[in-house]
Image: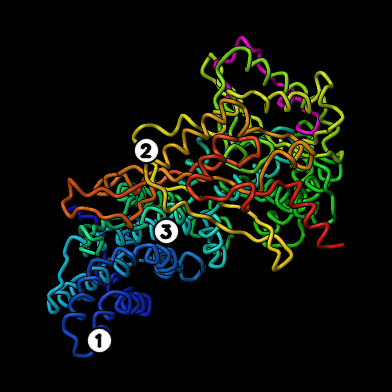
Amino acid sequence: MRSATSYFNTPLYQKNLARFWPIWAGYTLLWMFILPFPFFSILSRYGGDVERQSEAFLSRANELHYTLQGGTAISVGFGLAAAMAVFSYLFFSRSSCMMHSLPLDRKGLFWTNYLSGLSFLLLPHLAIFLITAAVEGLYHCLNLPVLWQWFWVQSATALFFYSFAVFCAMFTGNIMAMPAFYGILNGLAASVYYLLDSVLDEFLYGYMNLGRYWDTIVLWLTPSVKLIDACDPYQNIYSDELGGYTSVLSTHIHGSNTVLIYGAVGLVLALLALWIYQTRHVESAGDVVAIPIVRPIFKIGVAICSGMAFGIFTSALLGVYDNASTTMIFLITLWTAIGAFVAEMLLKKSFRVLHSWKSALILSMGMCLVFTGLKLDWLGFETNIPDSLDVSSISLANTSGGAPYDDAHYGSSVVIDDEQRIKHIIALHQAILKEKDRQSTPGNDYYTIRMEYSLKNGATLSRYYNSLPVFEGEIQAVGSVTRNVHMLLQDRELVRRMYRFDAITPEWHLSEAYVDGNYWSDKYSQTVGERFYLDQAASADLEQLWKAVQTDFDEGTIGVRYLFDQSEERLNHTYTSDLTFVFRKPVDTGNDSLYAERTFVDYAEPMSVAVQEAPGFRNKYFSITLTPDAKHTLACLEELGGPTPDNGLITHAQMRQLEEASNS
């Protein structure tokens, strides 16, 4: 008679529960303190005030989502502890031989231990769910949707991190290596991305980033960060017609689908762990890397990461500030060889590893060749400038738009799609490369530019040039960076796009305006910062002021850009004050996508209680530096009782004179 194969052993399961009880007991107690116990503290906090107690109970029941981000961090730690406990026999030769001699095949042994560790986490969740539901019911604040979401989200994150820890356990036979592998793999993608980004920034002139999609990919491959972000909660809050607080209509986490995906990945990792477990040798107990095929990957990874990380660190420590210097290449090569020897020591469990010098030499020489190639630009990265005929548009993003320091300077982003301006940007790009060797030369000022070419074949090409030196004596020098940037800043249509006038569409309502700036204080004999609100101005007056600014801009008397911050022209023709407009439009606070877009909602304005009529407000700010030449704007400000040239407004040149007189 053929015997049936069992994939689960009840006595072993019970033995694990009894043997490792501190883990699940501690986990349960921790969640008891987080969820049900705070309800009891409300009783003592508010004494006999039944109304305040009731409000506090309801608030607490609605806010259980706020424990999920911390709960994710808890899952990271307890998932590791549970996996290390139930698979601890893999790390000791005697225990491994004993467990594998039991009358139980490897599948049965794996699933029994796997489910044992998973029970350390999921059974406490069930107990906490039931206890918290009973406590909420006792105090008449039961909120099952919120409590249920806590249960499944916390269980899914625990499932993922526990399965991930089990997966890591299959690759090592060393109990100290397992938590190290678990922690490293949790952040490996982000660490490698950061190292590559840092190294390429050092070696490639004009390097911006690895690509627009890599940030998203790396975030998904860093589960602890991605899940904490996914568990970030938000509430839909509405106020009555007087602006008073009414209720929390719903509470959510914005990344429910993300949590489900990671939960499914956890199940896949469990199956992969089983597959690896079935091929793992019992004799590998004690080895840092238990799977033979992974050992060369481990050695190469340690060598490369050591070379880049410690090479850059040592360069900074020694004060090697020249990008892509020969010294930095030498240090990267040296640390790659050291990393290869260290990896070999871990694999062999011995310090006698000099016999592996050939592999260390190959790895270090390979790294030396790669970074020498980057330094010499063998791939033509730096000199790759597309032909204007192949370019459909160019985006100038986060460009330092010269002085003054208003909206056109900070974070300005413009798209250029006409042929003449495209040729101008390409000419600037060519000038930047021609003057590459002057990067370390002190200039009269500095300019930063990011450019992203969109090519007609669908490809993109991005470059970033930080702190390019510009020189006052080269404004008329044809082909120079200084002249090209100066011409860029004199293009009024381009400057209009920098200020983003077109972003103020009819749906935006002008709600307020104020003058923000520095003024001279005779009392303190120094400049003082002050904000002057035009709070007495009617809506029509503010619209008139906005039209005055646009008129002055069209006449070229405001919004003028200056390449050199300390030039006489700049100092004499700009005030030390900025005029800021606040525009506002309604947004639907009942829309879940609102949070995902990180939209700012201002609840200071009255809002309706009804969901379909419950708008919040989104604000947009527009700031422009005032000038002595903006006659229409200054006239409007005077009519509205704002600062004027005779009452508060002073130019940078006048401010400098006052400061010099005060110091003399």
Task: Based on the picture, tell me whether residue 248 belongs to the magenta stretch.
Answer: no
Secondary structure state at the residue bearing disc 2: loop
Q: CA distance from mark 3 to mark 2?
A: 54 Å
Residue tagged 2: 508
Q: Nearer the viewer, mark 1 or mark 2?
A: 2
**Marks 1 and 3, the one that precedes in the sequence:** 1
Q: Residue at x 61, y 34 (%)?
A: 559
Query: Where residue 489 appears, x then y in whole percent?
Result: 67, 28
Task: Report the disc number at residue 166.
Answer: 3
Query: Where residue 446 appears, x then y in whole percent?
Result: 76, 39
Q: Nearer the viewer, mark 3 or mark 2?
A: 2
Name the residue type under label 3.
Val
User: Which colour scheme appears in the figure?
Assistant: rainbow
Specify whether 215 is left or right of 616: right
- Nearest the camera: 264 or 200? 200
Q: CA distance from mark 1 to mark 2?
A: 45 Å
Secondary structure state at the residue bearing disc 3: helix
Query: Could you tell me which quadrant the N terminus lies in?
Result: bottom left
Query: Could you tell me which quadrant the C terminus lies in?
Result: bottom right
Query: Where residue 651 appears, x then y in whole percent?
Result: 70, 46
Q: Residue at x 27, y 81 (%)?
A: 37
Residue tagged 1: 46
Mark 1 Cα shell of 10 Å, populated few (<14), some (14-19), many (≥20): some
**Marks 1 and 2, the one that precedes in the sequence:** 1
Where on the picture, by quarter, is residue 519? bottom right
Name the residue type under label 1.
Tyr
Mark 3 Cα shell of 10 Å, populated few (<14), some (14-19), many (≥20): many
Q: Nearer the viewer, mark 1 or mark 3?
A: 1
Q: Is residue 72 visible?
A: yes
Query: Where residue 190 appears, x then y in whole percent?
Result: 56, 49
- Nearest the camera: 663 or 315? 663
Q: Residue at x 67, y 33 (%)?
A: 561
